[in-house]
Image: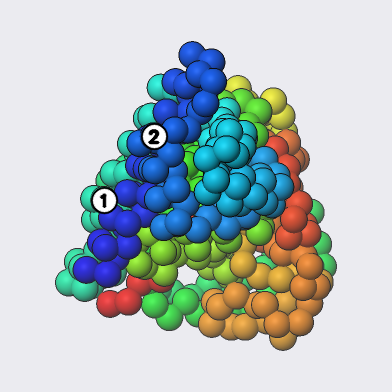
Amino acid sequence: MRLRKWAKSEAESRAELMALTEAARRRYEKQVGELWRGRDLKRVLKWWKKEQPTAAWVGLCTGGDGAYQWKLAQKFLTASKWRRRRWLLWWAMMMLYVGALQQLYLPEARFRSSYKDVWLMLMVPSVLTVEQEKEKTAMPGSDFKECEYRCPVMIVVPAGKFLMGSPESESDQYSSEGPQREVTIAKPFAVSKFEVTFAEWDACVVACACPKVEDSSGRGQMPVINVSWDDATQYVGWLSQSTGKEYRLLSEAEWEYAARAGTATRYSWGDKPSAGNANCNSCGSQWDRKQTAPVGSFEANAFGLYDMHGNVSEWVEDTWHSNYGGAPLDGSAWVEGGHQGLRVVRGGSWNDDPQYLRAASRLRNSTDFRSDSLGFRLARTLNP
């Protein structure tokens, strides 16, 4: 009930912002001398008083300098209490809402579609009930998603044990991949079937909860790129709040367990980077070292997960440690010690050589690093 009330309130606030921005667009295009007056002015003042938007929120929604626009809007709103100075409000609202218009309403049809998607996700939640979660947990390989639109499909991964890391005898092995040790995943958990897509990310952007990021080869079902670890955790937080469920990044151990999918070979399909299995430099696909491929362009592994090798490298939760000495054996994220400003990256990308796509290969980047070959995948804790 609380989730529904929160979702309704959020959706109503977005709807009001959309209506106000549409009014701004109409008046701006017609070059009306006073942008806000009469009923529109009352609506603006009522919305501002109710929402009390923060500088960070304004910045996300307009794509500009939130602190600057927020201060201007506050100043002009105060000035608007006197009729003689109401024209100042026009400048404040034009800067704020036309800024939002530029980022969210052009083209108008695309934003309307995006807004509808967010509305549906907020207003038509389809989270698993306790009984449904028990049923799904008992069926490894089953899938689910917890909102109607632009929500990641999750696959239930079974509990199990595996040998993490690589032996010294493995070709292209690095010292950071050892020492090998047995890791136990005690309970099933869910992993997103695909890497998080632009369609899914943009739903968070329209909800003013994530920053807009650039693409290089299209959006939609392409994996989201140019997202830092900080950005990825922001998306995870928003999705968790929207659904009321525990979404998160995978731990490094969970990632390798999911990538291997019961195998002990260099790749989930074998020891050789055979043509047609992934997108990388010299992997034999049409996208090799050119761009990302639409998610799901290659066969899934035995767990039903796509693109665990190649396409985009994936952020995980763990901080960077130079090797596995002292690492947890229960599959949990290793976030104590190590280099706190660096997080682990797994899987390799369209721009990497095949050796970096190996299940045991691990790299790292700073938490604010962005790249057109770097994205992420989700995990969801199951509570049977």
Q: Which residue is mark 1?
A: 123
In this view, the mark in front (1 or 2): 2
Q: Residues within 10 Å of mark 1 (few under 14, many from 20)?
A: many
Q: Residue at x 66, y 59 (%)?
A: 230
Q: Callout 2, which amino acid?
A: Gly
Determine which quarter of the picture holds residue 242. Answer: bottom left
**Horizontal arrangement in the rendering, residue 162 relative to residue 216 (left or right):** left
Q: CA distance from mark 1 to mark 2?
A: 31 Å
Q: Residue at x 41, y 57 (%)?
A: 50
Q: Residues within 10 Å of mark 2 (few under 14, many from 20)?
A: few
| Count of number-bearing discs | 2
Q: Is residue 169 visible?
A: no
In this orientation, which residue lies closer to the viewer: 199 or 139? Answer: 199
The residue most toward the top is 30
Q: Which residue is mark 2?
A: 38
Q: Quadrant of the C terminus?
A: bottom left
x then y, percent, for residue 47: 41, 49
Q: Residue at x 24, y 56 (%)?
A: 126
Judging from the image, what secondary structure is the residue with disc 1 in? helix
Rendered position, 47 above or below 243: above
